[in-house]
Amino acid sequence: MISFTLNGRVRQVDAEPDKPLLWVLREDLNIVGPKFGCGVAACGACTVHVEDQPVRSCSMAVGDVAGKSVITIEGLSGSGGDGGLHVVQRAWIESQVPQCGYCQPGFIMAAVALLKANPKPSDRDIDDALSNICRCGTYSAIRRAVHRAAAILGGAP
Ligand code: FES
Ligand code: FES
C-alpha cells in the first residue's frame, strides 16, 4: 500500500511503486483532470503539484509521492477564488483561453505554480515556466490569462 495526500485527503492505493503517478490518479483514483499526452515528460498535459511544485505525473513513480501532498486541477476549485473557482481558473475563463481544452489542466497547474513563485511574471517568464505544449496554439491567450490572474491577485477587480 502506498499512502499520500490527494487534494487534502489521505488516500491509499494498492499499486506497484514504479507505476506512474498519472495512471494511479486516472485508473485507481478516478482523478481524470491530469491528461495523458506524451508519457515522456515533454507536453505537460499531466502536470500536477507535488509538495507545491509542478511535476509531470506521467514521469513520476507513485512510490516517490508516498507521504507527500499531491494537488490536481480537481483540488484547485474552492481554494481561493469566486464561485468555487481558483483565481487562475477565473482568469482563464475571462480570457477565453481553451480551444479543445485537452492541454488546459496542465497549463493551469503550471500557471498556479508560476504565480506563487513570481506574482508578476513577464511574457518571457511565462514562456519559460509554461513549457507545456498546446496543439491548438492557445499560447497568446494563455499569456493574457496569466497576466489577468496576476492582476486579480494583485487586487484588480
Ligand atoms: S503526458 Fe506527461 S508530459 Fe506529456
Ligand atoms: S486547447 Fe487544444 S491542445 Fe491546447
Image: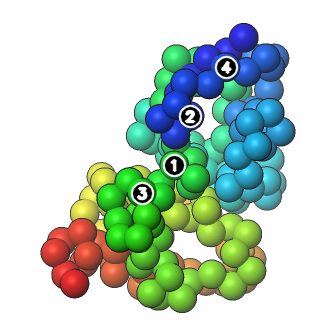
Q: Would you say the residues marked 1 and 4 are in contact, meaning their CB atoms lie under 8 Å apart? A: no
Q: Position of residue 17 (x, y in %)?
A: 75, 17
Give the residue displayed 62% in from the left and 69% down from the top.
Answer: 104
Considering every residue shown, the one lying at the far top of the view is 1
Q: State the residue position of label 4.
A: 12
Q: Is residue 121 above or below residue 148?
A: above
Q: State the residue position of label 2.
A: 6
Q: Nearer the viewer, residue 47 or 29?
A: 29
| Helix, strand or loop for disc 3 | loop
Q: Would you say the residues marked 1 and 2 are in contact, meaning their CB atoms lie under 8 Å apart? A: yes
Residue 143 visible in image: no
Q: CA distance from mark 2 to mark 4?
A: 10 Å
Give the residue displayed 47% in from the left and 70% down from the top.
Answer: 89
In the image, what residue type sits under mark 2? Leu
In the image, what residue type sits under mark 4? Gln
Q: Is residue 99 above or below residue 12?
A: below
Q: Position of residue 90 (x, y in %)?
A: 43, 76
Q: Position of residue 123 (x, y in %)?
A: 38, 77
Q: Earlier in the sequence, mark 3 or mark 4?
A: 4
Q: Is residue 25 above or below residue 45?
A: above
Q: CA distance from mark 1 to mark 4?
A: 17 Å
Give the residue displayed 52% in from the left and 17% down from the top.
Answer: 67
- Tell me if the residue at label 4 has its CB under 8 Å from ligand 1: no
Q: CA distance from mark 1 to mark 3?
A: 8 Å
| Helix, strand or loop for disc 4 | strand
Location of the N terminus by quadrant is: top right
In the image, what residue type sits under mark 3? Gly
Q: CA distance from mark 3 to mark 4?
A: 24 Å
Give the residue displayed 62% in from the left and 25% down from the top.
Answer: 11
- Image-quadrant location for residue 126: bottom left
Q: Position of residue 47 (x, y in %)?
A: 61, 51
Please give the label number shown on residue 75: 1
